[in-house]
Amino acid sequence: MRVFKTKWFVQFARRQRIADSSLCEAVRRAQHGLVDADLGGGVIKQRVARPGQGRSGGYRVLVAYRREARAVFLYGFAKSERNNVSDDELETTRDIAKGWLEASAGQLARALEEGLIQEVDYDDSKEKA
């Protein structure tokens, strides 16, 4: 399982002080079937806790997700700032997710080199524990 953040999401996570460990926990929950919302088109919505707080009042993140293969964090927002994404935003997110989920290893390597995405150190071995 490989986990990535888009360039936009890297900046969002830095501003909100969301640690990679919190993102990995969101992926782990999805791997165990605990998806907060399946938005279709390979996009899931997961809750991520604010630093030092719980998930319920924290952040909502949209993730391009393919079980056992790849997760790409695309977009996030604080629950206190907005309730959800619009239908148009969701459609655009699905299109973007499709591109990342269908990307070849070479395309991912090129995107990493160009700084379009950043890989998260995700430890699959914790899945089996």
Image (spheres, rainbow, N blue to C red):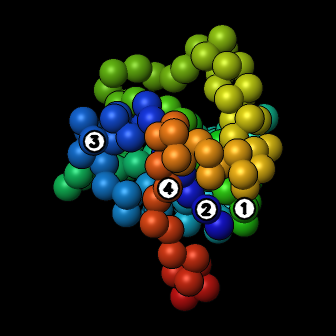
Task: Look at the numbered discs 2 and 1 and tell me whether their residues touch, using CB distance below 8 Å.
Answer: yes
Foreground label between 4 and 3: 4
Three-letter code, disc 4? Glu
The quadrant holding residue 12 is top left
SS for dot 1: loop
- The residue positioned 33% from the left and 41% from the top of the image is 13
Three-letter code, disc 2? Arg
* Labels 3 and 2: the sequence-earlier one: 2
Pick the quarter of the image with the C terminus: bottom right
Residue 38 seen anywhere in this rendered image of the structure: no
Q: CA distance from mark 2 to mark 1?
A: 6 Å
The quadrant holding residue 105 is bottom right
Residue 47 is situated, as x and y percent measured from the top left of the image, at: 46, 46
SS for dot 4: strand
The quadrant holding residue 33 is bottom right
Residue 90 is situated, as x and y percent measured from the top left of the image, at: 65, 22
Residue 19 lies left or right of residue 111; in this view the side is: left
Number of the label disc, if any, that sits on residue 2: 2
* Labels 4 and 1: the sequence-earlier one: 1
* Labels 2 and 1: the sequence-earlier one: 2
Q: Residues within 10 Å of mark 4 (few under 14, many from 20)?
A: some
Q: CA distance from mark 3 to mark 1?
A: 25 Å
Residue 34 lies left or right of residue 116; in this view the side is: right
Q: Is residue 85 above or below residue 58?
A: above
Which residue carries the number 1 mark? 69
Q: How many marks?
A: 4
Which residue carries the number 4 mark? 119
